[in-house]
Amino acid sequence: MHRELLEESGCRAGSVDFWKAYYPNTRFVLGYYYFIARDCEVVAPLDPDPGEQIAVRWITFDQLFELVYEPRFRHKDFTRELMDMMLHPEKKEAFRILLGL
């Protein structure tokens, strides 16, 4: 995970922990894996694989929840997770604590 984070964001993390996995289609062994990277610092330019189009955008914790309204944000399972946190402030606060904020 550390190598992938460095390659795709130019960041080095103090720690990276698994958070959740989503499997949107039971017909395929294809999942989305979410990790939490803490204590990140930019140490290198982006180095994406051929064909990858990656842009890093730094946002605040509260701006994270605004992503659910952006048409280009296509992570439906994560969107549902964020919306659930918006409806349940105690879950949002627990997530804030998990992130170390």
Image (cartoon, grey):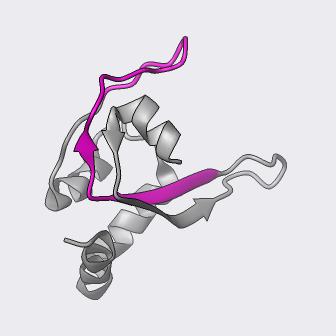
Is residue 14 shown left or right of residue 28?
Answer: left
Q: Which residue lies most toward the top here?
A: 50
Q: Which residues are magenta?
A: 32-55
Vertical placement of residue 27 versus 20, above or below: above
Quarter location, residue 15: bottom left
Q: Nearer the viewer, residue 29 or 7?
A: 7
Residue 21 counted in the magenta span:
no
Whole-percent x, y for residue 100 in the image: 25, 72
- Magenta stretch, overall SS: loop
Say which residue appears at 42% left-offset and 20% top-offset.
47
Say which residue appears at 41% left-offset and 36% top-offset.
6
How many numbered badges does the structure rendering display?
0
Vertical placement of residue 17 versus 91, above or below: above
Residue 36 counted in the magenta span:
yes
Vertical placement of residue 101 versus 97, above or below: above
Quarter location, residue 51: top right
Whole-percent x, y for residue 98 in the image: 33, 76
Is residue 27 shown left or right of residue 87?
Answer: right
Q: Nearer the viewer, residue 49 or 80?
A: 49
Whole-percent x, y for residue 1 in the image: 53, 48
Whole-percent x, y for residue 17 in the image: 48, 65
Say which residue appears at 49% left-offset and 52% top-offset.
76
Quarter location, residue 11: top left
- Considering the image in quadrants, where does the C terminus appear? bottom left
Q: Which residue lies most toward the right here?
A: 27
Q: Which residue lies most toward the bottom here?
A: 90
Say which residue appears at 15% left-offset and 54% top-offset.
60
